[in-house]
Image (cartoon, rainbow, N blue to C red):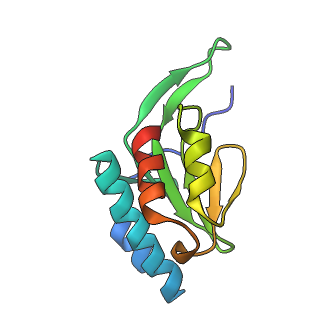
């Protein structure tokens, strides 16, 4: 069985964020970092080379595959800011309606810049997903 490549590391979150060359993306990343820290009450940790996660949980599938993963997090990618938010809670769809300009993937929200979204709505999404 293949081992999960993305694991929590000892890399410092601030060192990673300070290494972002694009000033706007770095500034937005620090804003999301503080928002997620406030919403979760958890300290940020690096997962792999480029994901900042908050909290963690252990999972185990019927197949026997198991591992650890973060509850919520984000990654400042080249194209956009990728936010990992657990869906499925009662107000998820209603909050997305108020969020602003974004797109979605399997378990991700993609935003170009923080001005495109309603920040208090994002904070509530993060709070309820964790």
Q: Foreground: 116 or 19?
A: 116
Asked if residue 12 lies left or right of residue 4, the reply is left
Residue lying at the far top of the rendered structure: 62
Residue at 53% x, 31% y is: 90
Please say whether residue 16 is visible from this viewpoint: no
> Measured from the top left, where is residue 109 in percent x and y?
63, 55
> Measured from the top left, where is residue 124 in percent x and y?
42, 49
Q: Foreground: 45 or 83?
A: 83
Residue at 51% x, 57% y is: 74
Q: How many labels, in total?
A: 0
> Measured from the top left, where is residue 123 in percent x and y?
41, 55
> Measured from the top left, where is residue 112 in percent x and y?
63, 73
Looking at the rendered image, the quarter that the C terminus falls into is top left
Asked if residue 7 lies left or right of residue 64, the reply is left
Residue 127 found in image quarter: top left
Where 25 sits versus 65, above or below?
A: below
Where 124 sits versus 28, above or below?
A: above
Please say whether residue 105 is visible from this viewpoint: yes
Where 120 sits versus 77, above or below?
A: above
Residue at 39% x, 72% y is: 30
Asked if residue 39 lies left or right of residue 61, the reply is left
Q: Foreground: 104 or 63?
A: 104
Residue at 29% x, 47% y is: 42
Looking at the rendered image, the quarter that the N terminus falls into is top right
């Amino acid at each position: 069985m293949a081992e999960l490549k993305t694991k929590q590391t000892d890399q410092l979150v601030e060192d990673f964020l300070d290494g972002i060359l694009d000033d706007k993306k770095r500034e937005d990343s620090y804003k999301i970092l503080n928002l997620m820290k406030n919403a979760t009450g958890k300290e940020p940790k690096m997962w792999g080379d480029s994901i900042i996660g908050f909290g963690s949980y252990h999972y185990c599938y019927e197949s026997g595959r198991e591992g650890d993963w973060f509850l919520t997090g984000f990654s400042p990618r080249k194209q956009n800011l990728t936010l990992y938010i657990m869906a499925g809670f009662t107000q998820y769809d209603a909050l997305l309606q108020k969020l602003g300009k974004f797109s979605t993937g399997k378990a991700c929200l993609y935003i170009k810049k923080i001005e495109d979204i309603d920040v208090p709505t994002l904070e509530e999404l993060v709070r309820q997903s964790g």
